[in-house]
Image (tube, rainbow, N blue to C red):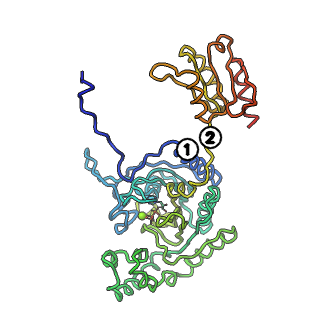
């Protein structure tokens, strides 16, 4: 046996930087957000999909593109020690959803509307609104090519913001056109930036011939003039691409969804074409994009499936929750707290509480502390601090008479009730009908 006095204390372990514990009571706000999302997705008939958080590295390299922030520097990749596979913690979930759709032939019967919620991993510098494990809500409409589905997913993200009471958010939209149009624009972009080579920073110089579109995304203040003067992709779009954007915008207008066209909106992943969009707020400092998405008609093919058009978005849950931090998401309060004077009563206490819980009463039970039950006064204090509306008292008198005493904790006028244990369901019912 080790001597507990002299044995060295185990070293304290902390969570990984940029990866957060989500603790009560804050976790209740997460649950409320998740409840909201589920009911919204049901209304739009999007079905839940759950894919692994680890995928083959190749999926993201092929899907997102080699010259992207994520693939170049943000992925948590490692080798599976047992078989040498190159694996990556998912940095986003569109590629995984598309992989699963192909693998399980989800589109055999036409389009599929899917949603997910869950953790994503990116090795970024942790700061407000930017973490290494963060969470996204995502919607993906696979197998749909028409602008009506671009509009549908945007309306859905807009509706979610409305439900959550997020006002102050701007919808920005752009079109990235089709690959051919982008190539013509790309050549013009390279020519433009080459002519202003001295104004470019090292990162921009490196990317100039690899992925010049991403230069438009640069936040470097010294480069803003040369970026503003750059050729606009919009001027290279053909009639069909312009018509697609106009159709999406028309449907948003018809539904009163205000939006602005941002020519510099290019998005971080290579897989987008035609419509791209972001919901941006000024209230979160530099990390103002709460939701981002667009059309990705070539991703299916890119990861080895039959060609199929698609459109979707992802929303950062941490940013959304920070935005609604001030405003209370409804969190269920305790209905009742059970006070118990003797451990011998627990079998009957459990019976009674089970009956109440089956009828939707939210009840917490006093448990023994170091093998003994606290005194009545201490238990009442805990009941009071719990926020419960009622105290349920299981004492010796009550047990002898087969009743429970019910005391309203928030209403000094209310009379105490002695409710027969055989009949607690009736009290539960009166609670529900009063609510
Ligand atoms: P940013 O420009 O802020 O890096 P991004 O283009 O990399 O964003 P997306 O990949 O489009 O972001 O992800 C969609 C949403 O997920 C973002 O708008 C944001 O709300 C959220 N998000 C992305 N990265 C993080 C992160 N590291 N921490 C918290 N939320 C994030
Ligand atoms: Mg990023």
Q: Is residue 280 visible?
A: no
Between marks 2 and 1, how big is the CA–CA gap?
A: 8 Å
- In the rendered view, does 61 fall on the left or right side of 342? left
Which residue does the image show at 61% across and 57% down from the upper left?
160
Q: Is residue 56 above or below residue 300?
A: above
Q: Name the secondary structure under disc 2.
A: loop
Residue 254 coordinates in the image, percent (x, y): 70, 70
Residue receiving disc 2: 332
Q: Is residue 228 visible?
A: yes
Tag of residue 28 = 1
Q: Residues within 10 Å of mark 2 (few under 14, many from 20)?
A: few
**Quarter location, residue 393:** top right
Task: Kindly indicate the quadrant of the structure image that contains residue 424.
Answer: top right
Q: Does the beta carbon at disc 2 come under 8 Å from ligand 1?
A: no
Would you say the residues marked 2 and 1 are in contact, meaning their CB atoms lie under 8 Å apart? yes
Q: Which residue is rendered at x = 32% and y = 86% of the image?
A: 198
Please give the name of the residue rendered at 43% of the width and 74% of the height, measured from the top-left corner: 217
Asked whether 432 or 393 is in front, the reply is: 393
Q: Residue furthest top?
A: 400
Q: Is residue 224 above or below residue 140?
A: below
Q: Position of residue 279 (x, y in %)?
A: 55, 66
User: Foreground: 375 or 38?
Assistant: 375
């Amino acid at each position: 046996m080790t001597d507990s006095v002299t044995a060295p204390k185990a070293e304290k372990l902390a969570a990984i930087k940029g990866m957060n514990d989500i603790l009560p009571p804050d976790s209740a706000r997460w649950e409320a957000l998740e409840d909201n999302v589920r009911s919204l997705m049901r209304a739009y008939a999007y079905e839940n999909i759950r894919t692994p958080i680890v995928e083959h590295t190749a999926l993201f390299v092929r899907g997102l593109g080699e010259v992207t922030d994520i693939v170049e520097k943000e992925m948590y990749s490692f080798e599976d020690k047992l078989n040498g596979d190159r694996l990556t913690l998912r940095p986003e979930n569109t590629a995984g959803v598309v992989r699963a759709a192909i693998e399980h032939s989800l589109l055999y019967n036409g389009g599929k509307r899917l949603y997910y919620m869950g953790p994503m991993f990116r090795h970024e510098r942790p700061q407000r609104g930017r973490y290494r494990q963060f969470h996204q809500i995502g919607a993906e409409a696979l197998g749909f090519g028409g602008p009506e589905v671009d509009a549908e997913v945007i309306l859905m993200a807009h509706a979610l913001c409305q439900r959550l009471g997020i006002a102050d958010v701007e919808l920005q939209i752009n079109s990235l056109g089709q690959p051919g149009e982008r190539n013509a624009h790309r050549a013009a972009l390279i020519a433009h930036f080459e002519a202003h080579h001295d104004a470019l920073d090292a990162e921009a110089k490196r990317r100039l011939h690899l992925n010049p579109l991403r230069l438009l995304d640069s936040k470097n203040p010294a480069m803003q003039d040369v970026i503003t003067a750059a050729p606009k992709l919009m001027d290279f779009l053909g009639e069909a691409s312009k018509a697609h954007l106009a159709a999406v915008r028309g449907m948003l207008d018809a539904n009163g969804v205000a939006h602005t066209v941002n020519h510099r909106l290019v998005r971080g992943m290579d897989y987008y074409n035609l419509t791209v969009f972001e919901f941006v707020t000024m209230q979160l400092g530099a990390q103002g994009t709460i939701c981002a998405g667009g059309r990705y008609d070539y991703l299916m093919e890119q990861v080895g499936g039959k060609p199929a058009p698609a459109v979707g978005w992802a929303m950062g849950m941490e940013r959304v929750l920070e935005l609604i931090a001030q405003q209370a998401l409804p969190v269920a309060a305790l209905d009742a707290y059970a006070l118990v004077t003797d451990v011998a009563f627990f079998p009957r206490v459990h019976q009674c509480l089970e009956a109440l819980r089956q009828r939707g009463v939210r009840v917490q039970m006093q448990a023994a502390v170091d093998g003994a039950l606290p005194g009545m006064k201490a238990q009442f204090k805990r009941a009071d601090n719990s926020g419960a509306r009622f105290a349920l008292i299981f004492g010796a008198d009550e047990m002898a008479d087969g009743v429970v005493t019910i005391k309203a904790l928030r209403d000094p006028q209310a009379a105490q009730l002695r409710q027969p244990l055989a009949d607690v369901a009736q009290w539960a019912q009166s609670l529900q009908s009063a609510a």
